[in-house]
Amino acid sequence: MPFEAIAPWRELWVYLSATPLFSLTITLVVYLVWEWVHRRSGLHPLLNPVAWSIAILGALLLWSGLPYPAYFAGAQFIHFLLGPATVALAIPLFHQRRRVAAHAKAVAAALVAGSVTAAGSAVALGAALGLDATMLRTLAPKSVTSPIAMAVSEQMGGIPALAAVFVILTGILGALFGPLLFALMRVRSSAAKGLALGVVTHGIGTARAMQIDPVAGAFAALGMGLNGVVTAVVLPWLG
């Protein structure tokens, strides 16, 4: 498309971006469009709406020159809802409480194995690639939700802002390729799928587990919460 045809649209974007609700509206529109595409595709993992929404919104910000703080000022209501949404995960967990209690020992074993593997593999891979100690401490809590990861990383001497980036990348990759790995490994248990996604890929993986079925969603919520507690307690002590 010629630059002359693009310029008016860019000017319109810059003008509208000054309004408080524009960032919120464009974020919701982009996500809902990709959510529709995702469902029309039969929930194909490579069309994950979170991953594509981040990519498209990032491209729009770069194209328009809109600073991220200005964008976030309008979209922060979505960020505010992250807390209530996390608390609401207790609802499916409550409905599946008997199933969770029946698998308590297996859950505990999987939690320990998943937590150790998630942090240990990241540190081992980072060390093999020659990353320094600060980067390794930043990378270690990548499998817990962003607020916990940032706090743990800071306490260990890492870089909190970069830790949040690693968390998001981990969640997106887990949501994209987790179902493919389950199919390759012939994992059929909804509880196992959900727990793995929750422990390793935190909130984004839990959202993906909710799309599998309520059992997977409940176990993902459990895994995300317990791994957050374990990581927050153990990693700073080890670091």
Image (cartoon, grey):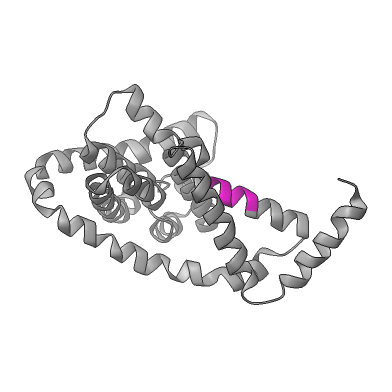
Is residue 157 inside the magenta stretch?
no
Is 152 situated left or right of 47 in this image? left
Is residue 50 at least partly visible in the picture? no
Q: Position of residue 220 (x, y in %)?
A: 28, 48
Which residue, as the protein is rendered here, is positioned at the far right? 4
Left/right placement of residue 97 relative to residue 170 reads left
Name the residue nearer the viewer: 201 or 186: 186
Against 107, is 23 above or below?
A: below
Q: Provide residue 12's location: percent of width, then percent of height.
A: 79, 66
Residue at 17% across, 38% down: 109
Q: Nearer the viewer, residue 182 or 198?
A: 182
**Residue 124 percent across, percent down from the top left:** 42, 32
Q: Is residue 163 left or right of residue 222?
A: right
State the residue lying farthest toward the front. 40
Nearer the observer, 155 or 45: 45
> Whole-percent x and y of residue 204?
41, 50
> In the displayed structure, would residue 235 be above or below residue 176?
below
- Magenta segment, principal secondary structure? helix
Tell me, yes or no, if residue 1 can be seen here.
Answer: yes
Quadrant of the rendered image containing residue 110:
top left
Q: Residue at x 54, y 49 (%)?
A: 34
Residue drawn at x 16%, y 57% as measured from the top left: 95
Residue in the picture at 31% in, 42% down: 212
Q: Which residues are magenta?
A: 50-56
Q: Which quadrant, please, contains the N terminus?
A: top right
